[in-house]
Image (tube, grey):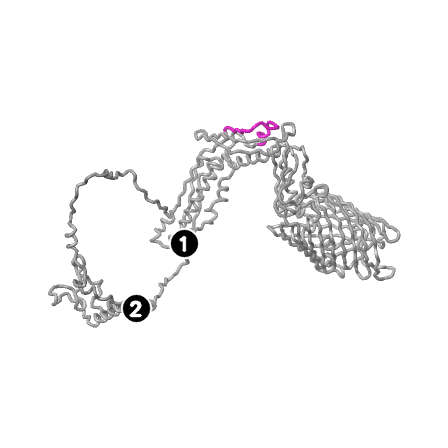
Amino acid sequence: MVPTVAASPVEDIAAPTPPPPGAQLPEVAPIIPDDEFRDAIPAISADNDPELDKPLETIAEFEKRQAEAAKARVAKSDGVSTADSTTGGDVPTIDGAPVPALADGDAVEAIGDAPITDAELAAPLPPLDSFNIVPVEFAEPEDAGDNRAVPYSVQVTGLASADDSTDVDLADLFGGLSALYDGDGKADNIAMVRARLSADADLMQRILASEGYYDGVVETRIDRSDRDAAGSDQAQGANARRQPVTAVIDVKPGVRYKFSDIILNAAPTVPPTLVQDNFPLAVGEPIVAQRVQGAEAAIALKLPEEGYPFAIVGQRDILLDGATGDGVYTLPIEIGPRGRFGGIETTGKLAFDAKHVGVLARFKRGDLYDSRMADDLRQALVATGLFSAVAVEPQKTGESAGDGTEYVTMMVTQEAGPPRTIAATAGYGTGEGLRLEGSWTHRNFFPPEGALIARAVVGTQEQGVGVTLRRSNAGRRDRTFELVSEATRSNYNAFEAITGRVAAKISYDSTPIWQKKLTYAFGAELLATSEDDYDFALGARNRDFYTIFGLLGQVGIDRTDSLLDPTRGFRVTARVQPEGSLAGRFSPYARSQVDVSGYYPVADNIVLAGRVRVGSILGAARERLAPSRRFYAGGGGSVRGFGYQQLGPKDPNNDPIGGRSLNEAAFEARYRFGNFGIVGFVDAGQVYRGSTPTFDNLRFGAGIGGRFYTNFGPMRLDVATPIDRQPGEGRISVYVSIGQAF
């Protein structure tokens, strides 16, 4: 839309000055007297023209009169004569009526070669819907897309002169961003080629400047030599439009500018060379935009890490000398006061108070300020799952902390989010059946971070309910206190049990955000369980009641690169559980188990993984152990290819009865492509009657699995078969769960 501007009076044009009051002006005679002017106008009245008193005819009467006149002309028409006896001159006539002359006196001429006597000229036009329009058909119709398509090639010249003075391949950099290359040599029309060529010229100019070639010149053209040989577009039509063209970009990089001086305008720091030592640019190196931005970002990050929370990096200035190719770089830096951690304050919609925030902090009052500790605190707050938004920012206090520093208050802005969560998991294993588990959690039922968890399990061979009280960050960051009460019913081939359990545990574990190198757990539990077992003396299964009290101690070492899907490193976990039966005479024993796993990447998308497990129970005969406290092997988390708990000693009914020791091993080759993966694996293991694993009579299973990788870990489907299958063993076992097998 074109804007409009209102016209204003022109002030510089002279205006007549009004006469002074009382002035006598001369009379001016009119050019034409009024009476003469009125007499010259003819009178308009019915007396002079009787037609004025006649009423106007209606539209219907007018159309009827016109139609009758047309019919009369057609009926009387016998041609056009050039002489009329009534007129006595050579005047053309139609139907005996003279044809009026044109403005210049010439008579109306005949239209084309058609004789004016043709009655069709006076006939009314037929209605539009009576026309029979037949479309034009071409002998060889061509596809519209083919007519528009313009093939082209791209030619870039001149970059070779810059290759010797830069460590960046400008051609590759340009090719990865080019609109012409992205078009794969095809365009709808030549205008599209020109548009892409113009965009790539601007891109090349920016690339040159980003690498220090500020005087670079980029010229473009479209080479139509092949098209000219084929003829013009009008002469050749669609064939000419399909002739290939060449989009040419001629580059003249010019001189590459270098730093002749670097000036950092900053106040003194502690240590004195803090800024210079952490600024990676040097005199003599090319002025590369990425290097400059990276150096400024490095200073902006380093200063807050070294006690300067309020440091600000200003706007750079680079003065270029076109004659020498030198550049003087100046960067202002506002250091701000050097600070130490002071108190913690909190504001907003609180999930917990500042005291508990202090439990999560890894710093204490008086420590030199470090922005990494502030970021760590923010991540710890996020990990609680209690906030929809949270921020941690330093604030000046002006309070001296000695040594030229001042205390900094950490202001935590909270926005508490919904504390409740509903979750569900599902899995399936041969011999284990289908298992569904759901939970409801209130993460802040007992502030701060006191969670109440209700859990239920529904499965083909296991059912149960339980309640857990869990205090996260209990007196120390990442330390958890847990109190559990649950009741379960299990119905497996090895045993059938109804169990009540109460347990308490304190643990220091890894979290999805912080993977600990060293973890531990200790606690106690009390079980009351009714279980059946095969009595060899009676030759039948017999149910017994067990009351068991036990302790737990566990230590773990983790040197892997991921908690959920490791690709390198190793893990070691050792567990000892001294426990005993409280029914009748107390009979103590100890259950111990060691797990070791390792991961090695042989390529970017191939990982070799292996694990070993050894377990032993000392101090009690197998018959005095509750069936649920014995060792078993077989299943998705043990030896794949066999049903759940199917390895080891069995009763006369071929049902497993468990043992006092076991050993397992597994090897996997994991291949990942995008969000999917394929795993080939071989597992081995066995359970023994004695308390010492003998590593003989090992059973092997082999199979293949699929993985679907999500943001919460891989989902797996494994299919395996036993090697040297024995009577009663299934040919195929299937396992579905979340997470890698180990």
Image coordinates for residue 333, horizontal then vertical, percent: 55, 31
Residue 724 can be seen, yes or no: no
Q: Earlier in the sequence, mark 2 or mark 1?
A: 2
In whole angstroms, how far apart are the C-alphas of marks 2 and 1? 40 Å
The stretch in magenta equals 260-278
> For numbered disc 1, what is the local secondary structure?
helix
Residue 38 vs 223, above or below: the answer is below
- Given the current orientation, which residue lies at the most extreme left position? 88
In this view of the protein, which residue sits in the foreground, 291 or 69? 69
- Label 1 environment density (alpha carbons within 10 Å; few <14, some 14–19, many ≥20): some
Q: In the picture provided, is 170 more to the left or to the right than 378? A: left
Q: Quadrant of residue 656?
A: bottom right
Amino acid bearing label 1 = Arg
Find residue 541 and name its label.
Answer: none
Residue underneath mark 1: 148
Find residue 126 and name its label.
Answer: 2
Q: Is residue 265 a member of the stretch shown in magenta?
A: yes
In this view of the protein, which residue sits in the foreground, 532 or 311? 311
